[in-house]
Image (cartoon, grey):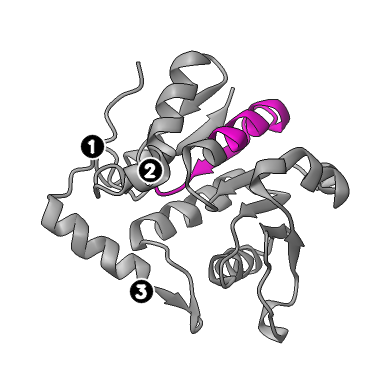
């Protein structure tokens, strides 16, 4: 059985923390990342040395901008690809980021149409799109099929359950993670090196840092 998604934060503290996340900007672009998870991404990118960082769900492009700058800071030639149904209009600040129009519910078609299966390895794949149970299950199944051993899937915002918001998303990421991992043992492992670095599931992505086995 998948372990609890409980974070170490009290409900009032978590609410205040989430308010900050939802107002967080990077280089004046909405980014919506928590300081803890930014620290975890910094650690993972250095450890994995990804050939490609693939983000599903672009919004305004702030997180893709952050990932690009981190990889440049580390002197990595990482391809930064971000996928969205309606990619934003961008300026020269976003040079080097590949914006792809695609649908999370058709991951196979989006990757095939845009030649994304040929992206350099290893991959880090980040799911930050609709957050619905169905969308998260599609991404889990896609990652199970196409990630190679040692590559990562980050299932973002599984904290929605503890924020009493999961019902809006038919259970959202936490339900998808629980049902998929229980039904498919041996495909992914929850990497507690990331989930628990600052306390057990002290992240907005509890149980959401998955390493392909």
Neighbourhood count class around disc 2 (C-alpha, 10 Å): few under 14, some 14–19, many 20 upward: many
Neighbourhood count class around disc 1 (C-alpha, 10 Å): few under 14, some 14–19, many 20 upward: some
In the rendering, at what x and y percent does residue 209 appear?
A: 46, 39
Distance (Cα) linking label 1 and label 3: 23 Å
Task: Using the rendered image of the protein, determine whether residue 97 is visible from the camera's viewpoint.
Answer: yes
Residue matched to label 1 = 6
Determine the residue positioned at 64% across, 33% down: 143
Residue segment shown in magenta: 137-159
Task: Using the rendered image of the protein, determine whether residue 122 is visible from the camera's viewpoint.
Answer: no
Q: Is residue 193 left or right of residue 81?
A: left
Q: Earlier in the sequence, mark 1 or mark 3?
A: 1
Residue matched to label 3 = 23
In the rendering, at what x and y percent does residue 142 appear?
A: 67, 33
Q: Earlier in the sequence, mark 3 or mark 2?
A: 3
Residue 158's tag is 2
Distance (Cα) linking label 3 and label 2: 18 Å
Closer to the camera in the image, 168 or 60 = 168
Q: Is residue 142 magenta?
A: yes
User: On the rendered image, what quadrant is the N terminus found in?
Assistant: top left
Closer to the camera in the image, 165 or 199 = 165
């Amino acid at each position: 059985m998948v372990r609890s998604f409980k974070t170490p934060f009290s409900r009032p503290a978590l609410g205040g923390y989430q308010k900050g996340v939802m107002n967080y900007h990077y280089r004046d672009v909405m980014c919506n990342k928590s300081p803890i998870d930014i620290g975890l991404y910094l650690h993972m990118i250095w450890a994995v040395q990804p050939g490609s960082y693939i983000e599903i769900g672009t919004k305004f492009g702030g997180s893709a901008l952050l990932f690009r700058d981190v990889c440049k800071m580390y002197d990595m030639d990482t391809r930064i690809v971000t996928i969205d149904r309606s990619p934003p209009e961008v300026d020269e600040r976003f040079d080097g980021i590949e914006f792809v129009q695609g649908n999370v519910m058709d991951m196979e078609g989006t990757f095939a149409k845009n030649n994304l299966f040929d992206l350099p390895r290893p991959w880090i794949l980040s799911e930050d799109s609709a957050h619905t149970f169905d969308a998260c299950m599609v991404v889990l199944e896609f990652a199970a099929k196409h990630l190679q051993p040692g590559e990562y899937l980050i299932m973002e915002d599984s904290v929605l359950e503890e924020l009493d918001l999961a019902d809006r998303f038919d259970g959202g990421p936490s339900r998808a993670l629980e049902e998929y991992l229980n039904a498919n043992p041996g495909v992914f492992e929850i990497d507690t090196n990331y989930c628990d670095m600052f306390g057990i599931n002290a992240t907005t992505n509890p149980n959401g840092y998955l390493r392909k086995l």
